[in-house]
Amino acid sequence: MYDKTDLNTIDLNSEPPLEEPARQYYFMAKCREWVLGFERKSGRRPTSKVVNFGCQMNARDSEKLAGILEKTGFMRADTEEADFVIYNTCTVRDNANQRVYGRLGFLNSLKKKNPHMVIALCGCMMQEKPVVEKIKASYRFVDLIFGTHNLYRFAELAARVLDSDTMVTEMWEDTDRKNFRSGGNMLSNPVSILCQAVIISAVTVLFRMSGAGSEAESPKKY
């Protein structure tokens, strides 16, 4: 059913559905509306770039995020000189955090040239509260921060940030990347089991609908 959903047929004058993944389709349509407005004003379609830091799990997630943006009308860019840039972060590999901070400085220089540029950070690094607080304090040009468990809500978060001039953040503070990535106490935690099921079902359906077929690019070593 949802694989054949046409975003143009969704009534944006109605209230967002409560159930998933219909709710995310509603907000994908909201993003689509923003894209059409951007195109009318600028004479071109907005571009997007998803850059993957770290593990294979991140690579799969990055493909889904890129596919959702593409479905809403964004064109995939070859570089980070895009209108919507996502860094999908990882804290497993050595110095991953420092690499992200270094690249954020580069994105800040791009945003000064392109003020409407949206910068989003996600992944397991964004599950760590000290990291999020540091970004809020020192990297205020970042527009969107969300954790691993909030991946399935990306369309909704993207719609919020496209309609806002303030930073949007969302993470589950009572979860961590160990429980999500490697299992942890998930089997003994019914909330975690439900969360994982929702993420798998919602994001998988969105990915299939988006028709995303190519992998998001991993960053070069700088």
Image: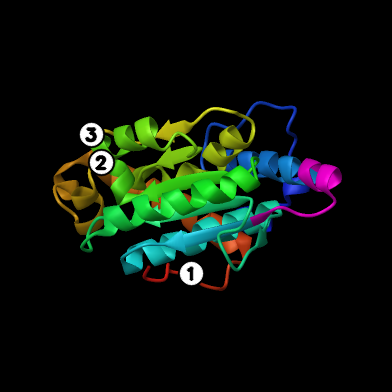
Q: Which residue is mark 3?
A: 174
Labelled pair 2, 3 in contact (Cβ < 8 Å): no
Residue type, numbered disc 2? Glu
Taking the spot 31% from the left edge, 35% from the top edge, the residue there is 134
Q: Which residue is mark 2?
A: 128
Q: Secondary structure at mark 3?
A: loop
The alpha-carbon separation of the residues under discs 1 and 3 comes to 30 Å
**Residue 90 is at least partly visible in this image:** no
Left or right side of 195 for 111:
right
- Label 1 CA crowd tier, 10 Å (few <14, some 14–19, many 20+): some
Way the structure is coloured: rainbow
Left or right side of 51 for 8:
right
Q: Which residue is mark 1?
A: 217
Percent from the top left, x then y, of residue 15? 65, 26
Percent from the top left, x then y, of residue 51? 47, 61
Residue type, numbered disc 1? Glu
For marks 1 and 3, the one nearer the N-term is: 3
Task: Find the magenta span and give its range.
Answer: 37-47
